[in-house]
Image: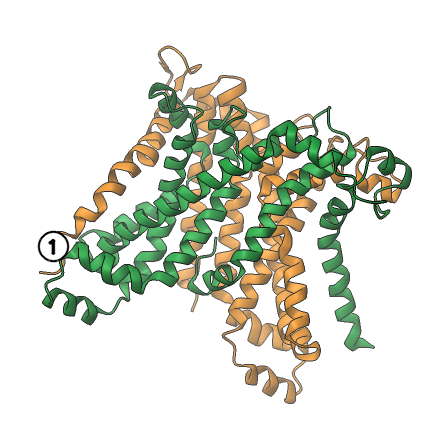
Chain colours: A orange, B green
């Protein structure tokens, strides 16, 4: 009896959801099979955009940059965050008190409270080629974001700075579940810090580890704001990523069909990555 | 000695993380002459506010703050209402096919906005909602509600059935039960969602950049992001612009700190 009539509550979302997400997504997929400048009638060209993608070096380069950004935004912060969270929880909090640990955690987390575009504004100023504070302080004359051989590494370093606090905070929250007696007992038994790390900390926060790695990987695949603010994909395509590449095709080159194909491929990759992560996570004990 | 070496290493790292904020704070209050003569590390000689004032006036920053605030607040409220309605049907009503509906919401939440942007842009132009804050509010309400539905359905799935049965015996219909019982009891979770939606929407960049092109409608991140590296900006004005972007974000963090920490405990992490 109870379950009847509840579907009425889904109607507002159904209408909005179809018009804001489902329909536009399907339109995007359909557009990816056409040549279209955004005005007039799109011309159906089948898989031509996708065939062009496979041969487009800039497209492949943009995915390589994405892999580099997954390293900078997901892999490095997660691993470093794990060590930092364990050090704060199992060493600093116990030897120097929980207040010291929370103060350090707050410092690591502060960049995370910024909108990612604002993080770009901050670093764009610090690294400005003519008056940036970093060059002034260290007496350098390096064009961090304007030199094609440095730009990607610079963006990667900025993203590590930006992301690091997120895993630290999530992992420390996960560690709250651990019985402190477990660490004390292990310490009395003579287990070293590294052994406690491997045998208590890591298994305990396995669920958080997967969630953080997944969400950061997706964020890295979608990254747009910092690229737009810092480099606009340049210099000479050195920091081009798929999201910015599709934006460029949509709004600057008016190659809407081609832009849609890039966006569709990006969407598929993200869905597959999410699915794979969820499968791996389920299989864990 | 070893006891302190780890602490020292972590303090150094914390300092590195905070250093950019420190530099922004130091240099936003200097004149360009003072910056070039004394360098970025010197403490400012008195408060030079011209850089901040000039930048504020140039971008009409008060209006940008209002736009961001309006959009984020409307999205937060709208998305919580939608999430509650959906989660009521899915978590408590257990409508048929709920698992698939949840999967669709989850996929929608992970879709890149790039795969929606052009059709939305085209549709907005067709219906005359291009460059309108209302359109951006509508889109983000739906996007955030996709996540909210997913989280809240799990929370309401554990809602004690006895309470609802007692209400039904007292003659309360579904609509009354939702607003008089389910919503008040779930208030802690709903306030977490409200805060997260507000901050996530405040932080958004891509869709507001595409949809809000006129100066009157832009949000804070868009206005500052577009001007970064502008030729007309000098060193201290750039620093002032960074400061204006940092301050609201840090203020929200301080105000909502407790709710955000609680959010991590309920699993509202992203």
Is B27 displayed left or right of A215 in the figure? right
Q: The N terminus of chain B appears in which quarter of the rendering?
A: bottom right
Is B46 displayed left or right of B119 in the figure? right
Residue A91 vertical placement versus B179 (above, below): below
Q: Residue at the location (47% across, 33% down)? A: B207
Residue carrying label 1: A4
Q: Secondary structure at mark 1?
A: loop
Which of B110/A18 is in front? A18
Extreme top residue here? A40
> Which image quadrant is residue A124 in?
top right
Q: Residue at the location (37% across, 14% down)? A: A42
Which of A38/B140 is in front? B140
Q: Chain of mark 1?
A: A
Residue B36 vertical placement versus A195 (above, below): above
Residue A85 vertical placement versus A242 (above, below): below
Q: Is residue A272 visible?
A: yes
> Which image quadrant is residue B51 in?
top right
List x then y, in percent, for residue A60: 57, 31
Which of B174/A190 is in front? B174
């Amino acid at each position: 009896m109870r379950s009847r009539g509840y579907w009425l509550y889904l109607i507002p979302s159904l209408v909005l959801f179809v018009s804001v997400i489902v329909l536009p997504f399907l339109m995007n997929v359909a557009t990816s099979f056409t040549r279209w400048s955004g005005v007039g009638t799109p011309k159906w060209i089948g898989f031509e955009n996708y065939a062009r993608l496979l041969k487009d070096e800039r497209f492949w380069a943009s995915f390589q940059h994405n892999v580099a950004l997954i390293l900078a935004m997901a892999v490095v912060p997660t691993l470093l965050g794990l060590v930092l969270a364990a050090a704060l929880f199992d060493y600093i909090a116990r030897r120097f008190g929980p207040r010291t640990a929370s103060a350090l955690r707050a410092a690591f987390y502060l960049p995370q409270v910024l909108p990612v575009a604002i993080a770009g504004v901050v670093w764009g100023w610090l690294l400005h080629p003519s008056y940036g504070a970093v060059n002034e302080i260290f007496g350098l004359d390096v064009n961090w974001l304007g030199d094609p051989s440095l730009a990607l590494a610079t963006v990667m370093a900025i993203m590590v700075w930006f992301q690091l606090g997120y895993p630290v905070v999530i992992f420390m929250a996960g560690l709250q579940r651990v019985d402190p007696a477990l660490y004390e007992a292990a310490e009395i038994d003579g287990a070293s810090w590294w052994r406690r790390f491997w045998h208590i900390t890591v298994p305990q926060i396995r669920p958080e580890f997967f969630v953080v790695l997944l969400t950061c990987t997706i964020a890295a695949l979608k990254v747009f704001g910092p690229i737009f603010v810092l480099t606009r994909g340049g210099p000479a395509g050195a920091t081009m990523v798929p999201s910015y590449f599709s934006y460029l095709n949509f709004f600057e080159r008016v190659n809407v069909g081609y832009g849609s194909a890039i966006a569709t491929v990006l969407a598929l990759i993200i869905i597959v990555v999410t699915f794979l992560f969820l499968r791996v996570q389920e299989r864990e004990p | 000695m070893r006891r302190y070496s780890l602490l020292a290493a972590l303090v150094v790292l914390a300092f590195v993380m905070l250093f950019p904020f420190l530099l922004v704070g130091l240099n936003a209050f200097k004149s360009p002459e003072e910056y070039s003569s004394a360098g970025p590390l010197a403490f400012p000689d008195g408060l030079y506010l011209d850089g901040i004032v000039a930048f504020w006036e140039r971008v009409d920053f008060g209006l940008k703050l209002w736009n961001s605030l309006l959009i984020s607040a409307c999205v937060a409220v709208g998305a919580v209402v939608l999430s509650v309605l959906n989660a009521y049907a899915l978590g408590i009503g257990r409508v048929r096919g709920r698992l698939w509906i949840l999967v669709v919401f989850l996929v929608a939440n992970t879709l890149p906005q790039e795969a929606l942007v052009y059709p939305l842009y085209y549709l907005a132009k067709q219906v005359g909602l291009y460059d309108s804050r209302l359109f951006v509010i509508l889109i983000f309400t739906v996007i955030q509600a996709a996540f909210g539905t997913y989280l809240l359905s799990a929370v309401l799935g554990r809602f004690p059935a006895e309470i609802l049965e007692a209400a039904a015996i007292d003659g309360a219909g579904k609509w009354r039960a939702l607003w008089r019982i389910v919503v008040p009891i779930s208030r802690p979770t709903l306030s977490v969602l409200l805060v997260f939606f507000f901050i996530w929407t405040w932080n958004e960049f891509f869709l507001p950049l595409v949809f809000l092109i006129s100066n009157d409608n832009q949000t804070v991140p868009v206005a500052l992001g577009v001007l970064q590296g502008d030729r007309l900006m000098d060193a201290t004005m750039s620093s002032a612009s960074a400061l204006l972007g940092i301050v609201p974000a840090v203020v929200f963090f301080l105000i909502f700190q407790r709710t955000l920490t609680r959010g991590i405990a309920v699993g509202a992490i992203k």
